[in-house]
Amino acid sequence: MNTTATQRAPAIELLEVGKSYGKTAVLSGINLAIAPGEFIALLGPSGCGKSTLLKLIAGLEELSDGEIYVGGRLANYLKPSDRDVAMVFQNYALYPHMTVRENLGFPLKMSGVAREEVRAKVESAAALLQLGEQLERYPDELSGGQRQRVALGRAIVRQPLAFLMDEPLSNLDALLRVEMRTELVRLHKRVGRTTIYVTHDQVEAMTMANRIVLLHKGLIQQVGTPAEVYAAPANMFVATFVGSPPMNLIAGRIESSGGQRLFRGPFDLALDGLAPAALGDGPATLGIRPEQVALVGAGEPQALPASVELVERVGPDSFVLAHLADGAALNIRVDAATPIREGDHVFVRLPPARLRLFDAAGMAVARERA
Amino acid sequence: MAQAVEAPAALDGADLRRIAADHARIRRWRRRRNELARHCVLALVTFILVAPFYYVVLASLKNGTEIFSYPPKLLPIPPYFGNYEKLLWDTGFLRWMFNTLFVAGAVTTLKIFLDSMAGYALAKIDFTGKRAVFLLMLILLMVPIGALIVPLWSLVSGLGLTNTYLALILPPLANPLGAILMRQFILGLPRDLENAARLDGLGEFAIYWRIVLPLIKPGLVVLAVIIFTDQFMSFIWPLIATTSDDLQLLTVGVAALRAHGGANYGLWSASAVMSLVPVGIFFFVLQRQFLARSLAGALKQ
Amino acid sequence: MAETVATGLAAGAAGRLRLSPAEHRRLARRARLRRELTGWIFLGPMFLCFVVFLLLPVIGTVWWSMRSGSILGGTQFVGLDNFLQLPGVVGAGAAIRNTLVFALLSVPLILVGALAIALVLAGIERGGSIYRFLVYFPVLVPGVVAALIWLFLTNVDFGLFNEVRRAFGALPVTWLGADHALTVLAVLDVWRNVGYWAMFFVAAIIGLPTELYQAAELDGASAFARFRHLTLPLLRRIIFFAVIVATIWGLQVFDTALVLTNGGPGTATTTVIYRVWLYVFASNNKVGFASAISLVLIVAILALTLVQMRLLRGRRGVD
């Protein structure tokens, strides 16, 4: 458990932010501070409230609870255009009756920037995004990728405190998406502005963000760097959402027997170190990632028998779906060269150091320091 | 034991091609015969619908005695223009036409703005009473002016507005159809566009004026056409609201021709034809778009 | 509780708001007021006209219907007397009867004809737009002018109808006599309005999913079977909507009745709105009855409107 210490004043702060429509709460108890220049991903499945949170920060929706501070100022009651943030929408929202140049210059024109300055900024943004050729065209003459860059450009020209991006890549085809992902990361390194990036794609979040905020059912599940979130998921939701294929989960019970704490399930495991004494008996879940399961020989210590149901060959790796004695499923990543076939009987070992334990409520149980 | 289904004799390539060509020819012929039947039916129907117009044009070009002659002349040769002369110079027809076009134009222009603003508020702004207002409009949508002539007339004369253009222009502004239609159109606009505009610093009115209005132009055209034709044809309210000759509208004036002035069929037919000229031109010009868009608005699905 | 959420906020800051609830309320109220004001500024002008020239008159009709007198002279309160006496008042019953008969005659004819035309028109491949233009043209004719045109058609001596009858050796008919006047009026309305509904149905038919028809054709359904089992059910809601709206419009008939027959002969074609007009402007003391019968019409229209709203809110036809 560590808190990312922020030395400078946060760019954006969310205090107890909540949003409800009538009686239904879409977001509750959101507390977050975003450091200047950070790239934060709001990650979660559809309906978890991430887009709503973004709109609350932008001022496009009204807060039901809490406070939002942008650049140190209370933003709750500020108009969107007064908050000094720019947004890139999922379907670009370009003004169809204006040329690219006019689209790019529009926000500047609205804030009363002088014409020459508008021109200069538009040109530099267009250069940055390779839109120089498209300046006199209309949005419906552009390809999806170009439109997306215009949407980005429109945000860039404003040089705002923060960029808010609402799943900007999800309307692009797969190849373009990967390309644009790299572009965005590069852009962030160059321009260095605080960015809040909403996505449901955990690969995007993992590759692009400094920190990831996982949201589910309107609540923050975990905040951490990609590494933290991957290696030390705070609960089962995070464990299965991040990482593809998801973490293996094995259900069982914690029992005390003869002074020993045991995890009983498809196999028995001594818990020492894995769980603090404070944790009571009861249902629990063990988790381990597919790449952490080892295929071993029959005689090795802690080897467990398993039968192979399916082998998915995906290039350099293969994913093996195997079943333990009582039917519990296990996904194992192996090298493609490993000779393994459906129907094989193999032995697997789950290194205790890699195991994560989750309690009955699905929360991760911290390891006891030895 | 015979097989239930016999395998067909083997067909070679040429046979198959011939059969396919035969089928295609039969299908084409069937489609053409179908099409021809449709054209026949439609030609008959349109003839029935349109023949009266020709008949009236004919009558308008005949003088008094020719109209009654039997067998009737089917071609207007030589054409007699006396009816038209009488209509245009001796009656207030031109004045009526001007009044009607002026009032219809004024109502249309005003309503375009009033209704689009109201539609924008109903579609995009959250304020108390919005649902109640919309519901009220839906409920009273179909109540015609004709059923309200007593209180309307009392109101208008109470305000001292009888025999003014205002009396003709104001009451039609109350019709909620425009606001409801505009709300529909504006709801159909992509949500994020307006959000982007807000972030860019546009105030509410600027969003309405610079973003929404240009994007609902087709809807505005539909609305304008509906309102204009409606106003052109309105009768009962203008009948009651204006008694002075100066302010007569076309419909009222033509009805007056019928009521007074004996049985001057020539004049009547000329007035009928002349009344249709502006509509005919207008419609012919907008023909293609008019039909497509007028229907888009009419369908509630 | 294991603290595993790394929010980045300073220690202890999480969950503590910096402004008091009271201050929040004040600021929120200001923002909300601004929004309400904007909403009403946009809606205001149109709504003002709506209230003054539509809503108030509707209420006014109720008020007037409970008074007796003349519209310019004084009136006095008589409660519900007007309604009680209405059946006996001269012309009232006849007006209602005529209007209902008129609607019952014209609406089915209009809609059936329009549907038939639409079915034929929707399937045409080329040249359709000429027919659309011509079929729709009578819709644009003001009622007064249409009636004028029909005066020509129905004239006993030189009218087209009788000319045709004579050509076939039949005797001329007094079309605008007491026997036929209302029917002729109804047919006039059909002629005027069939084009409107025909275009309406054409748009609806074009919007139907063609895959269903292709599937039915493959299943061996004849054209008539496809109509009966596919088109009709799919258009059910639209047809219902058309029935309601066409009826509401039919109940308002006035200008054609005035110009074609002057409400006659006698009162054969005096409709409700016609009768209202007569009560108010052709007599001196019937403003109460005029309003009462207007109210009856308004209530009928509102009832039909509510039926239609209930229908449109109901189960989605065939998905």
Image (cartoon, rainbow, N blue to C red):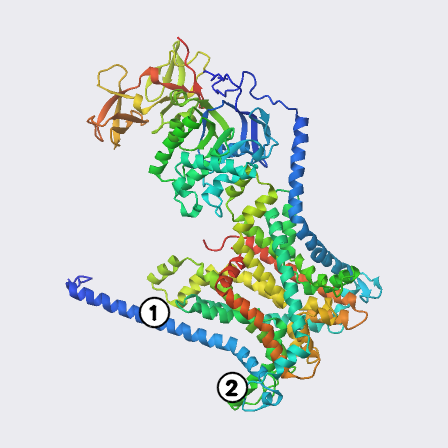
The residue carrying mark 1 is B31
Image location (x, y in percent) of residue A18 = 56, 30
Query: How many discs appear?
Result: 2
Q: Relative to A285, say whether C295 is above or below.
A: below
The numbered mark 1 sits on a residue in which chain? B
Q: Which residue sits at x=39%, y=68%?
A: C126
The residue carrying mark 2 is B74
Image location (x, y in percent) of residue B229 = 59, 65
Q: In which quarter of the image is residue C60?
A: bottom right
Image location (x, y in percent) of residue C89 = 76, 71
Q: Quadrant of residue A252?
A: top left
Q: Identify the secondary structure beneath mark 1.
A: helix
The numbered mark 2 sits on a residue in which chain? B
* Kind of residue sitting beneath label 2: Leu
Quarter of the N terminus of chain A within the rendering: top left
Q: Identify the secondary structure beneath mark 2.
A: loop
* Mark 2 burial class by Cα count in 10 Å: few <14, some 14-19, many 20+: few
Quarter of the C terminus of chain A within the rendering: top left
Q: Which residue sits at x=36%, y=25%?
A: A247
